Image (spheres, helix red, strand yellow):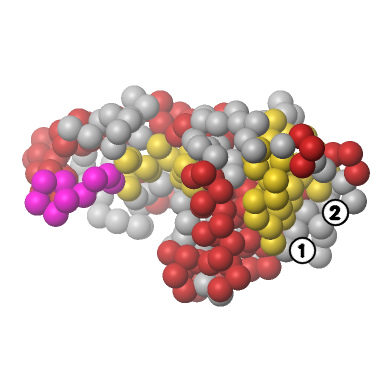
Amino acid sequence: MLAGDFAYFAPDLDHTNQCVQEGLKDWLNWLKNDIGFEGFRFDMVKGYAPHFTKLYLEATGMANNSSLCVGEHYTANLVNNEAVYDQNPSRQAIVNWIDGTGGVCMAFDFPTKFILNATVKGFQPTLWRLIDPQGKPPGLMGWWPGKAVTFVENHDTEPVRNNGQDFPSSGLQLGYAYILTHPGTPCVFWRHMFDGDEGLKSAIRALMRTRTRNGITSESPITILEHDADLYMARIGNKLTVKLGPRYELGSRLPKESDGWHLACSGQNWAVWEKR
């Protein structure tokens, strides 16, 4: 049954009803076998118990790690659309949902999206937000990267929604430099890839190539090297070093060519080095 705060979004389907279950199983199998779907995005999963997602996936034979499944569990700690530093309740709620599916489905990493929003919003960056008290990334990525689908924008938060949750346009390149180099499964927003300005599209393509070339995966290890207001540096899989923020005087912390590091791509307030 639909949760109370989401009841106005959709019809109140009773997923415990056998007829409803069989109808949804038939529909999903039609999408898979006749239309050619290779994965599913489950919308508004707070509206029904997570074990039903597992039930429907098993009926299609796609309850395995080789198939794509991602749930939209819209959760983040926000005050007036601003992410608070402690995202633990939000990511715990998402982890609980993934556990409820038996681990067969990933989830959109809303905590990471809103932390990134807050990091680049305003006149001064607050890149210290990109680490939690345990020294890990602050979103779902920091707890369960293999199940985290990271993103900077989606159809619910884009500017046309006018809900104050869109990603600041001036920080889009920096946001993609973060998710396309870090663990998790990054998701690029269609408008940014195909309707965005040439600078943004070029940066996304360069970051994609760098990620692929260096074999960065959803579970690549990460070490956060610096986390200050105007500087964030991290090393991923000992293959990439990422610098975010306007500070350029890095001194001895700058990756050195003598140590095998080569500048792979860069843009406004971000740079990525790869290990040769």
Q: Nearer the viewer, mark 1 or mark 2?
A: 2
Q: Position of residue 96 (x, y in %)?
A: 45, 29
Residue 117's place in the image compared with 72, above or below, is below
In the rendered image, which residue does mark 2 sit on? 247
Let me know if residue 43 is in the magenta part: no
Range of magenta residues: 32-40
Q: Quadrant of residue 274?
A: top right
Residue drawn where x is 16% and y is 46% of the image? 32
Q: Nearer the viewer, residue 177 or 99?
A: 177
Local packing at callout 1 (Cα closer than 10 Å; few below 14, some 14-19, many 20+) is few
Quarter occupied by residue 198? bottom right
- Where is residue 141 drawn, in percent x and y? 56, 36
Disc 2, SS: loop
Mark 2 crowdedness (10 Å alpha carbons): few <14, some 14-19, many ≥20: some
Please name the amino acid that badge 2 sits on.
Answer: Arg
Can residue 149 be spotted in the picture?
yes
Q: Which residue is mark 1?
A: 122
Q: Secondary structure at mark 1?
A: loop
